[in-house]
Amino acid sequence: MPQIFHRSTNTLAKLSIFGSIFVLLFVTWAVAEINRSSWNTGAFDEREQPVQFSHKHHTGDDGIDCRYCHTSVEVSSNAGLPPTKTCMNCHSQLWSDSPYLEPVRASWKENKPIEWTRVHDLPDYVYFNHSIHVAKGVGCSSCHGRVDEMPLVYQAASLQMEWCLECHREPERYLRPKSEVFNMDWQQENALAENKTAEQLARGRQLKAEYKVRPRAILESCSTCHR
């Protein structure tokens, strides 16, 4: 019986199989990278606000502590947004006639809160508590980046589950003394103040024990964040 297919068909068949596997792996990798990208997560996308409020000016230049505006960050799951009265504590005297602050003055006169645009927005099925992170020595800049250098605030991290798990699996990489939690200048040789050197990691492990950070098995449990 004569040969139906040419000998090269065997080679083409093998190339097709391996080529399909390569294409499948490439597509999987590409989808994962797109999912992590700022295009999908919204990271580094500056959000316009109804008031031209600059964290760089207020926090960086004027040195206002985070807790002056975010009053509940140490005691509540929510960091809290400042009421208009907090703004007017200063701006009833400073820049009181500035057109940029007209939305603040209108909010104060009409007794209506300013509708700020949310920057860090976790899904409804994720439970996050600010107070417990602050109590365990996780600094503001470890999650929010250098807010004191942001004229307009943007999301400095992906906020995806894998990003959260990086810290929950090795909290010693991100812990700092409680006295430095609100210090934006803390260890800023890297973007999110990560402990990298042997000395820094040793201090992180010491703080982990001192602050009684829960074991990894509990930190990685689904019910810790998904309740």
Image (spheres, helix red, strand yellow):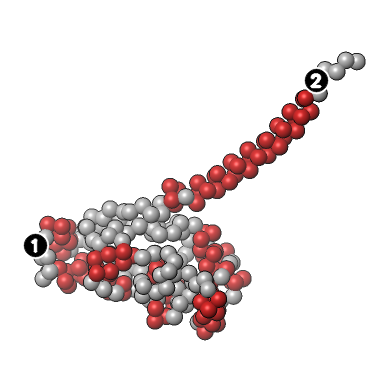
Give the answer, above or below, for where 145 lies relative to 202: above
Q: Is residue 150 left or right of residue 143?
A: left
Q: Residues within 10 Å of mark 2 (few under 14, many from 20)?
A: few
* Image-quadrant location for residue 55: bottom left
Q: Nearer the viewer, mark 2 or mark 1?
A: 2
Query: Could you say where residue 153 lies in the image, as x and y percent from the top left?
Result: 32, 59
Q: Residue sitting at 29 percent across and 58 percent down?
A: 152
> SS class of the residue under badge 2?
loop
Q: Residue sitting at 57 percent across and 64 percent down?
A: 222
The amino acid marked with disc number 2 is Phe
Query: Could you say where residue 14 lies in the image, as x and y percent from the top left?
Result: 75, 33
The earlier-in-sequence mark between 2 and 1 is 2
Q: Given the current orientation, which residue lies at the most extreme right position?
A: 1
Q: Residues within 10 Å of mark 1 (few under 14, many from 20)?
A: few
Q: Residue sitting at 31 percent across and 67 percent down?
A: 148
Label 2 to label 1: alpha-carbon separation:
86 Å
Q: Given the current orientation, which residue lies at the most extreme left position?
A: 97
The amino acid marked with disc number 1 is Asp
* Image-quadrant location for residue 61: bottom left
User: Disc number at residue 191?
Assistant: none
Q: Quadrant of the N terminus?
A: top right
User: Disc number at residue 97?
Assistant: 1
